[in-house]
């Protein structure tokens, strides 16, 4: 395992609640090094951070590690199976909703009326 990949795994495992689910993959091409990261669905928020700040910081640190070895290092964070959208759909399906109904988008006036108490 390369130094940049080891650094990423160590860093991410220290941030998440499910370190056993952390997986990284390293590929090298003409654009540089691409590290892909897979984490448990519940840990995505911790890796992304508020407004993406944690992910930006991890990418910055990886670029610094890459500069040490004259390599351009990029990070791709994969959306886990059972991510946000999948969990919401599974919850609505298991809560007794037999059918998902498509609704027409509301007008601004309708949305404001819905907010009034």
Image (cartoon, grey):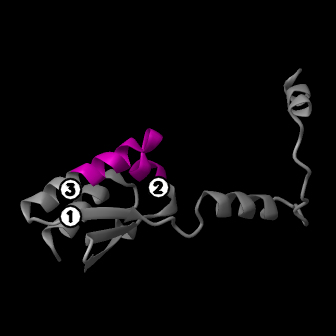
- Residues drawn in magenta: 44-60
Tell me if residue 54 is in the magenta stretch. Answer: yes
Describe the element under mark 1 as helix, strand or loop: loop
Tag 3 and tag 1, C-beta contact below 8 Å? yes
Residue 76 in percent (x, y) is at 38, 64
Q: Main secondary structure of the magenta part?
A: helix
| Residue found at x 30% / y 57% | 12
26, above or below 98, in the image: below
The nearer-to-camera label among 1 and 2 is 1
In-front residue for pair 99/70: 70
Q: Quadrant of residue 54?
A: top left
Q: Which mark is residue 44?
A: 2
> Could you tell me how far apart the alpha carbons at marks 3 and 1 are, in whole angstroms?
6 Å
Q: Quadrant of the N terminus?
A: bottom left
Describe the element under mark 3 as helix, strand or loop: helix
In-front residue for pair 29/64: 29
């Amino acid at each position: 395992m390369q130094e940049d990949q080891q650094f990423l795994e160590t860093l991410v495992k220290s941030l998440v609640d499910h370190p056993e689910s952390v997986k990284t993959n390293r590929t090298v091409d003409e654009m540089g090094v691409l590290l892909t990261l897979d984490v448990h669905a519940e840990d995505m928020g911790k890796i992304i951070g508020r407004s993406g700040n944690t992910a930006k910081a991890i990418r910055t640190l990886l670029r610094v590690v890459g500069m040490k070895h004259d390599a351009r290092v990029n990070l791709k964070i994969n959306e886990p199976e059972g991510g946000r959208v999948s969990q919401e759909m599974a919850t609505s399906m298991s809560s007794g909703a037999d059918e998902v109904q498509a609704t027409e988008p509301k007008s601004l006036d309708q949305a404001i009326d819905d907010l009034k108490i």
